[in-house]
Amino acid sequence: MPSKAFSVGEIVMGRWPGGHLYYEVQVMGYNKNTQLYTVKYKDGTELNLKENDIKSLNFFKMKKSSSGSRQRSRSRSRSPARTQTPKQSNSRGKEPRKLVEKEEVRTVDISKLKSVHQIQENSTNSKATCVTDYTGEKEKNKIYRLVEQKTCKEIVTDQLGLYNLQAKKEEAKLVNLEAKDGHLHAKKQAVQIQELGFGARVGMTKSAAVMIFLLPAILILLLLMCTQDDPSILNFPPQIPHPLALWNSTAFGIFVLWFLFQALLYMLPVGKVVDGVPLANGKKLKYRINALYAFLMCAVVLGVALYNEVNLSYICDHLLQLALSAMMFAFLFSIYLYARSWRVPADDLAPEGNSGSYVYDFFIGRELNPRIRNFDLKYFCELRPGLMGWVVINLGLLFAEMKVQNSDVPSLAMILVNCFQLLYVLDALWNEAGILTTMDIVHEGFGYMLAFGDLVWVPFVYSLQAYYLVNHPNELSWPLALAIIVLNTVGYTIFRASNSQKNAFRRNPHDPKLAHLKTIPTATGKSLIVSGWWGFVRHPNYLGDLIMALAWSLPCGFNHILPYFYVIYFTCLLVHREARDEHQCRKKYGVAWNKYCQQVRYRIIPYVY
Ligand code: NDP
């Protein structure tokens, strides 16, 4: 374990989380386990920082006094604790020593800090403007408003996250305007590779490689298990058919056509266009909200197909081949996504998808919002081909059940599974805009993980209960069916109400309808809800989702664990997701998040977890 570099009580410069600016802070404590320092800013905000994000006061002074005049003025722009008037900026290189002295005493009162900063690059003149916004009266705004002209080089160095305030010769070469055509990525990655360490990278590469092959294997095994007369764990593994029997070009063609049909519906100029949440560079992307219209169009097409006696049980007969086609498509699509991510500016990359491990980055996704003109590939895949495909597969399985069981009507269990899951999909489509604030859209890159999840895992794994019921009917009594309906309703209510509450609050925290909610302010300017659903547990939406997952499996009875795969997998997924979100929130909100966790003790299940 590395030794502690800063002592309690010491005044140092702390990096503002998520930014590149440093402020004067006092070290309040050090946690050996997390290896985080608790530091206090001048406005009283306490945050936990990594050692890398802390510099001694001398660090800044030394850089200035040891560098040439040009670099000295540059170093000034790196420290937010220093202001700069246009006059001083003109004096670059003229009175170096004097300038340093002035800088050292000029410290911005960050108690006036509202939302940290925005960096806007002006590519036409290779300059960028760094604006720090402060609250307070107009006059104070003038005093505290900091507008620095930075060269492209400085901004790029900022983006690289290099703490060395002295621009080195090699960096100067690197950040020249070539940064735009990909050198920036290489440098940024190189820095991250160094930070990660060899062992960590090998571990990440291995686990990503395993997942890339494990997920398709699990899906194929699950589907094969469902076709067994006795799908018990004792009969595992099922007999694997010849690979050629798994491939079917017609099935692949159907999948591609389905994808293109959905793309066409997505492009229809119907539905309103809304803004996404601001990106790290301050920009907001536009998204068209028309998934529900697309679904209605699909329903019409499906109705016409059924009227014309199109055999929907084809889906059941070729489910394995369709799943394999979707896998192949998702894999090729991920290669395309990975390849194109090397041509986009650094700004467009996802924070986690740039580790330096090629396999890991391919898996987790490099580009945050890959778009072909206005066509947002990630947003499109999240709700359309897979989610609507799931409903169509369920319907096909319902018809197949009637055929296999030689019945004129589907079983009660099959009806419940179809209805519950249809409600879930309709809810997602109805609340399409809500997805814009989820982790997938805001933080995750679009790579194999999401492409496979959206296009393969959701439609083919989530329909497992219906597939199971085709060959393993379960007589459901009405009282039991009613109990399951109540359970699903409870789950749905928690899920919907909590998601809506958070979405409404994030969209407009001053909404009078939300005035009753207690909140904790955070140093980022956003607040955390600490009452209502979000005061019940820290992820009430996950709780509701899990209750529904259970309600979808119960109609299949208790003979086998196979239809409960979804609940088990989903619990693991949400526990893992919760941990990742927790990590992100702690990084983002620091002490405020800790306060929230103290007040709302349970993560997902009250008194249990
Ligand atoms: P959430 O919608 O729960 O979003 C988490 C974010 O909410 C945090 O990062 C934080 O972001 C904000 N937040 C957390 N706590 C608070 C609080 N107290 N007050 C205000 N904001 C808070 O996460 P997901 O995107 O993971 O899930 C969205 C939905 O999708 C869930 O219902 C989940 O169950 C479902 N889901 C379904 C899956 C499926 O396969 N069926 C898979 C994954 C998710 P910030 O502060 O930046 O706004």
Image (cartoon, rainbow, N blue to C red):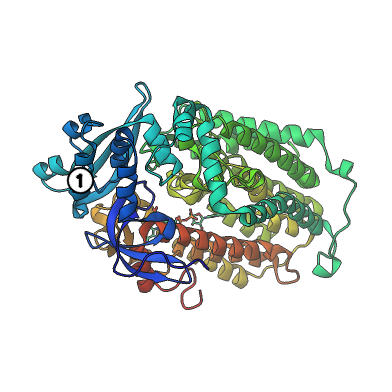
**Relative to 47, 346 lies left or right:** right
Q: Quadrant of residue 95?
A: top left
Q: Residue furthest top?
A: 124
**Figure check: 502 above or below 161:** below
Q: Nearer the viewer, residue 57 or 443?
A: 57
Q: Nearer the viewer, residue 529 or 167?
A: 167
- Does the rendering let one see residue 379? no
In percent of width and height, residue 379 lies at: 52, 39
Residue at disc 1, CB closer than 8 Å to ligand 1: no
Residue drawn at 22 percent across, 40 percent down: 97
**Relative to 82, 166 lies left or right:** right
Q: Quadrant of residue 517?
A: bottom left
Q: Secondary structure at mark 1?
A: helix
In percent of width and height, residue 254 lies at: 72, 34
**Figure check: 393 above or below 481:** above
In percent of width and height, residue 503 lies at: 38, 52
Q: Residues within 10 Å of mark 1 (few under 14, many from 20)?
A: few
Residue that mark 1 sits on: 101
Residue drawn at 56 percent across, 49 percent down: 194
**Relative to 392, 238 lies left or right:** right
In percent of width and height, residue 606 lies at: 46, 74
Q: Residue furthest bottom?
A: 607
- Does the rendering let one see residue 153? yes
Q: Amino acid at mark 1?
A: Glu
**Relative to 382, 225 lies left or right:** right
**Figure check: 284 above or below 512:** above
Residue drawn at 75 percent across, 42 percent down: 322
